Image (tube, grey):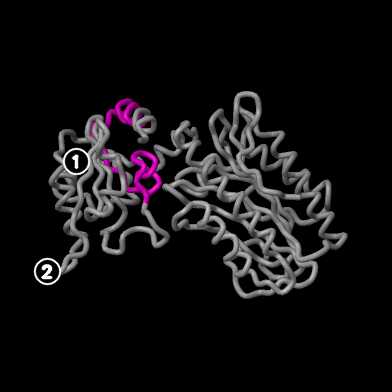
Amino acid sequence: MHQEQRHPTHALLREKGIDQAIFGRRESITWLTGFAPPVQTGSNPFAAGNPILWYDRGEFTLIVVNQLETLATSFGDEPDGQVISYAGYTLDSPIVSSQNLLDAFHTIATIHTGRIGVERSFVSDLITGPLERSTIVDIDGWLEPLRMIKTEEELAVLRRNFALTDIGHAAAREAVAVGKREIDVWNAMHEAIQAAAGCRVPVGNDCIVGRRQANIGGWPEDYELHPGESLIVDISVVLDGYWSDSCATYYAGERSALQAKLHQTVRDSLDFVCSLLRPGAVCGEIDHAVREFIAEKSGYPVYPHHTGHGLGTSGHERPRIVPNSTDVLGEGMVVAVEPGIYLPGETSVRLEDVFLVQADGVEKLTNHDIS
């Protein structure tokens, strides 16, 4: 699994004259190996930190805590990969997982070159012993351009996750009613997603009533839905290390004339941004065009957040559709777009769909009802 991702990584490192490297960023490791924390609680509480991936002239070694997490990946069965583990929790000795991780790393990291590529922001504690005498080359961010183009394997995982978000939205729409709380809608959505997935599934992002003063985003609380009130439901499903995303705005009863106008304006802007998603398009120019479209069409405040973002092993990754972004769209990129209009303390609307950029346009990957 994920050999398609490791091949261009190997080529990039060779091109830069780097024979050995250490990857410690969670998104990098998931992208290169398929390994991801298996449950909502995240990393094993006895782990020294994120897993570590050691690269040595085309071979990758994943270092994770204890046998249970070792079994969570098939990476070690692949020709260019192996998995080793270190002790986290033990009954008969103090918990010294940090030292155990260092010992495991130094067992396999035989230094052959004076130039070692390091995701320094994530693994600085490992730079001891022979590494201190090596030339450290910062490789933070090197994989981000490669991660923007999705493989067929990645797209299959993402499509599954988007189908789960669609199920969640259907349940949320059904649950919205006067007197229901934000958390009631959220629980109905989450239950439907986990029932369909057949396992525990981490879910984000927002579930907020329009009368909140900060009504752009936030966790669900015990705010009750008032008659005619708007409710933004923004859902990300995180499964097998990959993130989905999508957003709709629902209403408890009939929409007011103002809400209907806002909703239609945001729908029109979503259609507009979709028409701009083409290979070669510059993300900063797309962002400017969509903000201008909303300002000219409605005169209402333009949203104070991104127009869109990439998705993959992170919920927000390149390409970023934000002001002044120089990212250029290319075939195989997956981007979420989410314009909105917010009137603090009164009402708000945001709609979000996700698209696969293709040679002749886009394929919409989300199919929830945004009407």
Seen at 83% across and 53% down, the residue is 299
Can you tell which of label 1 and label 2 is closer to the viewer? 2
Task: Indicate the position of residue 80 as horizontal and vertical percent values.
Answer: 25, 32
Q: Is residue 198 above or below residue 273?
A: below
Q: Secondary structure at mark 1?
A: loop
Q: Residue furthest right?
A: 257
Q: Is residue 96 above or below residue 79?
A: below
Tell me which corner region of the image, top left, top right, bottom left or bottom right, holds residue 7: top left
- Label 1 packing within 10 angstroms: few (<14), some (14-19), many (20+): some
Which one is in front, 97 or 187?
Answer: 187
Seen at 62% across and 63% down, the residue is 207
The amino acid marked with disc number 1 is Ser
**Magenta region, residue range:** 9-36
Seen at 29% across and 57% down, the residue is 49
Which one is in front, 240 or 143?
Answer: 240
Q: CA distance from mark 1 to mark 2?
A: 37 Å
**Residue 190 in view of the camera:** yes
Q: In the rendering, which numbered label is found on residue 134?
A: 1
Q: Please tell me which of labels 1 and 2 falls first in the chain.
A: 2
- Label 2 packing within 10 angstroms: few (<14), some (14-19), many (20+): few
The amino acid marked with disc number 2 is Asp
Task: Indicate the position of residue 263 as horizontal and vertical percent values.
Answer: 78, 53
Task: Indicate the position of residue 370 as horizontal and vertical percent values.
Answer: 72, 50
Task: Indicate the position of residue 139 as horizontal and vertical percent values.
Answer: 35, 40
Left or right of 179 in this view: 20: left
Left or right of 358 in this view: 268: right
Residue placed under numbered mark 2 in the picture? 92
Seen at 82% across and 46% down, the residue is 296
